[in-house]
Amino acid sequence: MSSGSSLIFHIPSSCRLPLSPPSPRIPFLRTRFISLKAMASEDGKDHRLARISSSIRVIPDFPKPGIMFQDITTLLLDHKAFRDTIDIFVERYREKNISVVAGIEARGFIFGPPIALAIGAKFVPMRKPKKLPGEVISEEYALEYGTDKMEMHVGAVQPGDRALVIDDLIATGGTLCAAVRLLERVGADVVECACVIELPELKGREKLGHRPVFVLVKG
């Protein structure tokens, strides 16, 4: 055999292994990027809510005995829970033609601005008396003992604006009602009130009557 020749082996047909058909392509990328919203739809629950709920600290007897204070500052320390909170609100209101996000002092100022920016709406602060520098209109509401007022700048909201009212918590519903009345007095259409937490035993929804309320977790 010369050095330039090559060896050729012939395998009997009886010894040949059948070729397997190519396996179907596994959609790794498609599976990997399933959104949380789609995952939640499998069992009818949004899995982000568990993270949000577990990130909220409850402090007993604050600011006075008998009160279980729902502390959202621990939610803000968890950037994933905070982001999930904003994302859920944005997903709900992005397509509702909201033109005003009205945030109630003070924790409504935390959640309201990022929601307003994401959905392309203006943010309007609803403040306690003597906190806004310009001309204001005010609305009185009842407290456990006495009354208080909610104020808004004149001209901040126009007739026909579609408004979302945002706060961290709905308890007795007094501040939400005052905010809604202020907005309706200037001709705005209040689409919904949105809160991170609800205390159902205090029946704040009843004060709001027919106005819809959306909450993420219940305390």
Image (spheres, grey):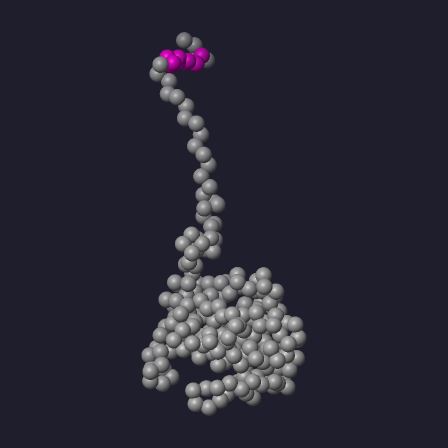
How far from the left and from the top, in percent, is residue 166?
Answer: 52, 73
Answer with left or right where residue 35 lies relative to residue 102.
left
User: In this orientation, which residue lies closer to the viewer: 70 or 217?
Assistant: 217
If the image is split into quadrants, where does the N terminus sit?
top left
Residue at the far top in the pictured view: 1
Answer with left or right where residue 183 lies relative to residue 175.
right
Whether residue 131 appears in this view of the structure is no
User: In this orientation, which residue lies closer to the viewer: 62 or 8?
Assistant: 62
How far from the left and from the top, in percent, is residue 137?
Answer: 61, 85
User: In this orientation, which residue lies closer to the viewer: 128 or 165?
Assistant: 165
Report the residue at 41% width, 66% height from top.
52
If the image is split into quadrants, where does the C terminus sit?
bottom left
What is the span of residues highlighted in magenta in the rendered image?
5-13
Position above or below: 186 against 117: below
Report the residue at 56% width, 88% height from top.
130
How far from the left and from the top, in percent, is residue 42?
Answer: 42, 52
The stretch drawn in magenta includes residue 160: no
